[in-house]
Image: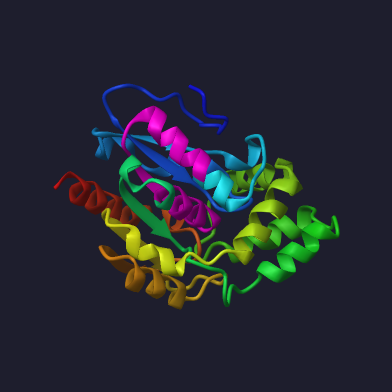
Amino acid sequence: MQSSLHLTRQPVAGRTPLLCIPGTYCSPEVFELIDERLFPEIQVLPISWMTSPGPWDIPTLGQRVQQLAEELGPCLLVGHSTGGAIALAAALSNPASFRGLLLSDTGANMHGHGDVSSILKIIEQGATGSAFFQQLMKRSFLHQPEPALLQRLLEYAENVPSEAALQALRSQAALDLSNALSRLMLPVIVMHGRHDQARPIAHAQLLSQRLPTAELFLLDSGHTPMVEVPSEYERLLRRLIMRSAS
């Protein structure tokens, strides 16, 4: 495989790839919680973009995801938080590479994002540390993960390059995909936690309004629904799979 993006699993033939892109400082392990026994037709392939070689700006990462999809064949694409912006950039670069798109707690831009400015300032000052990542995790969940998982998520966040986060968030803050979304005619599911402390529900509503085939679902979760409400997440993933097959 020619792609420089790190996958946490080796692709296998005969199943539709489900490329999963996490948010900034978010471990791809959040997607390992998806129960693949419920989805024999797909293979979950989390992408660790923060530990992949740079550059890490959103348009470049989107092109690299699209190139990965070309290598693997038509894929389903999942994006969470910053990963949602990467997923949108990938789909816009060549919609034919993807069968469907699931977006969670993300947006077409970062207008009104609750804490991106303060996060960028902390990274720029080199002030990231244990307390910073603990606060970041706390705000990312309404329902906190079990302690062992939380510890692994913290360890991942503490060990990825700050430059990856800096480039991604700077480019995301400058990016607005709103006017391009009407070009995406593939099946789209948009989900958003009602209690998300980072992104307002209006971001999800804008996506659902601008994406021609999007369906919007509000969940009883914070910023990370695949961890907090896995059954609901899996139900909507099944819906996307069914829509993409029709």
Q: Residue at x 24, y 33 (%)?
A: 40
Q: Is residue 63 above or below residue 1?
A: below
Left or right, 54 with reference to 64 = right
- Residue 15 appears in view: yes
Of the pair 40 and 24, the residue shown nearer to us: 24
The prevailing secondary structure element of the residues shown in magenta is helix
Q: Residue 1 lies in magenta, yes or no?
A: no
Of the pair 34 and 18, the residue shown nearer to us: 18
The furthest residue to the left: 246
Of the pair 124 and 8, the residue shown nearer to us: 124
Q: Residue at x 66, y 71 (%)?
A: 115
Left or right, 175 with reference to 180 = right
Q: Residue 77 lies in magenta, yes or no?
A: yes
Of the pair 200 and 72, the residue shown nearer to us: 72
Q: Is residue 115 above or below residue 79?
A: below
Q: Residue at x 59, y 50 (%)?
A: 26
Q: Position of residue 101 (x, y in %)?
A: 34, 52
Q: Position of residue 140 (x, y in %)?
A: 57, 62
Q: Position of residue 165 (x, y in %)?
A: 68, 51
Q: Position of residue 80 (x, y in %)?
A: 48, 55
Tally of marks: 0
Left or right, 122 with reference to 58 = right
Q: Which residues are magenta?
A: 63-91
How was this image coloured?
Answer: rainbow
Left or right, 73 with reference to 226 = left
